[in-house]
Structures are given as structure tokens and as C-alpha cells.
Amino acid sequence: MTPNTSFQEVLEKQQQVEKTSWKNEVDSRQRKPQFACHELTCQGLKFSKHANERLASRNIDLTEEQLERLETGAKKALEKGINESLVMVDNLAFIVNVKNNTVITAVNDGEDKVFTNIDGAVVI
């Protein structure tokens, strides 16, 4: 602030900054979430590179509700002391490393249904 700057000028500048900040916040809230499943992270649940590749190659697009259910399944597995869990969401199967909170791979209806190296399963 210079000696010649009036209180009104300072106030107007501050209001402009607040208006811009508010507009940016509203704009970011209006954007729809992107669940294209590439480099996906949802509320702490991570997807490995392999899982992202499987989702893309198998044309699996997860809805927000499915992602929430997948995370719920991972939390339930953690509560039961499961380390490597099969989490079933609708017709989709996910192998989740519970300790690392990471989806390792994803399988849809058209795939074989044999899962190894898991110590528990959660059906959501």
C-alpha cells in the first residue's frame, strides 16, 4: 500500500480477490468427477498401474457408487484382518492389497473366475 492509496481502493482490491477466490471454488465444485479409471485414486484407495491397465483394456468404467462400495469392502477386509482380499462389486472382482490400500487387479464378467493368493473375500 502506497501513501496515496485510499481505503476505498484497498477495500475494492480485497473484494475483487475474494470474488475471484469464490468463483474458482464454485467452478471446481461444479466440475463432474472423472472416473475414467486411469491413474485413479478414490478417497485413499489407490489403483496400481496393473489395475489401471486392466480397467482400460477391459473397458471397465466405475461409477462413483461402485468406487464407494469398493472402498467400503476394503475397509471391511481391514477390520477382519485380511491382507489380500477379493472384493466383489456387482459383476466386478477386485484384488485389493488391504495393508497398502491398493487395488492390484480388476476382472469383469467375461474373465475366468479363479483367484489365488488371497486370504479373504468381501461381497458388497
Image: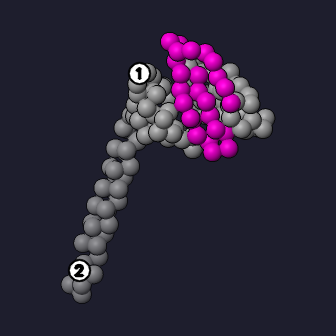
| Residue under pointer 1 | 59
Residue positioned most to the bottom: 3
Residue 88 covered by magenta stretch: no
| Quadrant of image for the N terminus | bottom left
Residue positioned most to the left: 4
Q: Position of residue 42 (x, y in %)?
A: 52, 39
Residue at x-position 56% and y-position 15%? 112
> Which type of secondary structure does the marked residue at label 2 adopt?
loop
Three-letter residue code for mark 2: Thr
In the rendered structure, which segment of residues is drawn in magenta? 93-117
> Which type of secondary structure does the marked residue at label 1 adopt?
loop
Look at the image and tell me whether residue 118 can be seen: yes
Three-letter residue code for mark 1: Asn
Please state which of residues 62 and 54 is positioned toward the viewer in this rendering. 54
> What's the CA distance linking mark 1 and mark 2?
60 Å
Q: Residues within 10 Å of mark 1 (few under 14, many from 20)?
A: few
Look at the image and tell me whether residue 61 can be seen: no
| Residue under pointer 2 | 5
Q: Position of residue 36 (x, y in %)?
A: 40, 31
Quadrant of the rendered image containing residue 117: top right
Residue 105 covered by magenta stretch: yes
In the image, residue 16 sits, relative to residue 24, either above or below, namely: below
Front disc: 1 or 2: 1
Q: Position of residue 24 (x, y in %)?
A: 34, 50
Quadrant of the rendered image containing residue 83: top right
